[in-house]
Amino acid sequence: VGAAIGVNYNANALEMPYIFQSNPDLRGLKTLLDLHTNGVGLDGSFGITAHPFRRVWIEGAYKTASHITSTGRATGNMSAQFSALSIPFQPDFAYNAQVRVTLPQSASVAARWQVSPVWYLNVQTDLVDWKHAFHDLPVALTHGTNSDINSFLGSSALDDTVPLDWKDQVTFRGSVE
């Protein structure tokens, strides 16, 4: 039986065109965005190895999800979008940025059977819970520096959620040695 506590470091770097996804005032609006954040989260894991019969071993392991809130800065320029829509706003902006990332929980079960003195049969299955961990990616921007955008939004902060909609991963494997 064993257990451990893990420390996870996360860094987000996005330097590309970005389309606002869920903010009702900005949905579909495109901007050049330069976002850099980083943060730390914890997870726990434990496992067990059992030898219930002379020639059989069974193992199991579980790792908890890790929730990481990373913070940093986001800057950008909306000049192309503002020009195309004839919006007379100052195009440059900067925000304090916060991105909430969840690394998935996972579980693994394995068995080993000694078929003969020199042959072993091994099977293992793993489950990684991507579906709940990477369902969406919440991004919070605060303390905006562009007074035109702040006036339009009625706030110097905005939230956006990027839909990810990942699926769980189940892996089966077997081997003979």
Image (cartoon, rainbow, N blue to C red):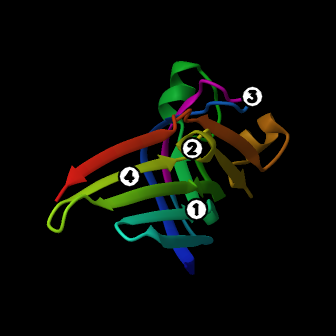
Is the N terminus in the top left, top right, bottom left or bottom right quadrant? bottom right
What mark, if any, has residue 25 been given in the picture?
Answer: 3
Front disc: 1 or 2 = 2
Name the spot of residue 48 as percent of width and height, x first.
Answer: 53, 72
Q: Which residue is mark 1?
A: 73
CA–CA distance in space, label 1 to label 2: 22 Å
Residue type at tag 3: Asp
Q: Residue at left 75%, top 28%?
A: 25
Q: Residue at left 77%, top 44%?
A: 150
Q: Residue at left 19%, top 62%?
A: 116
CA–CA distance in space, label 3 to label 4: 49 Å
Name the spot of residue 77 as percent of width and height, x first.
Answer: 51, 43
28 in the magenta segment: yes
Q: Which residue is mark 4?
A: 124
What mark, if any, has residue 134 been given in the picture?
Answer: 2
CA–CA distance in space, label 1 to label 4: 43 Å
Name the element at disc 3: loop
Residue type at tag 4: Gln
> What crowding class fits label 1: few (fewer than 14 Cα within 10 Å), some (14-19), or many (20 or more)?
some
> What crowding class fits label 2: few (fewer than 14 Cα within 10 Å), some (14-19), or many (20 or more)?
some
Q: Quadrant of residue 41?
A: bottom right
38 in the magenta segment: no
> What crowding class fits label 3: few (fewer than 14 Cα within 10 Å), some (14-19), or many (20 or more)?
few
Tags 3 and 4 touching, CB below 8 Å: no
CA–CA distance in space, label 3 to label 1: 21 Å
> What crowding class fits label 4: few (fewer than 14 Cα within 10 Å), some (14-19), or many (20 or more)?
some
Of the image marks 1 and 2, the number of the one nearer the N terminus:
1
Of the image marks 2 and 4, the number of the one nearer the N terminus:
4
Rendered view: 172 above or below 24 = below
Residue type at tag 2: Phe
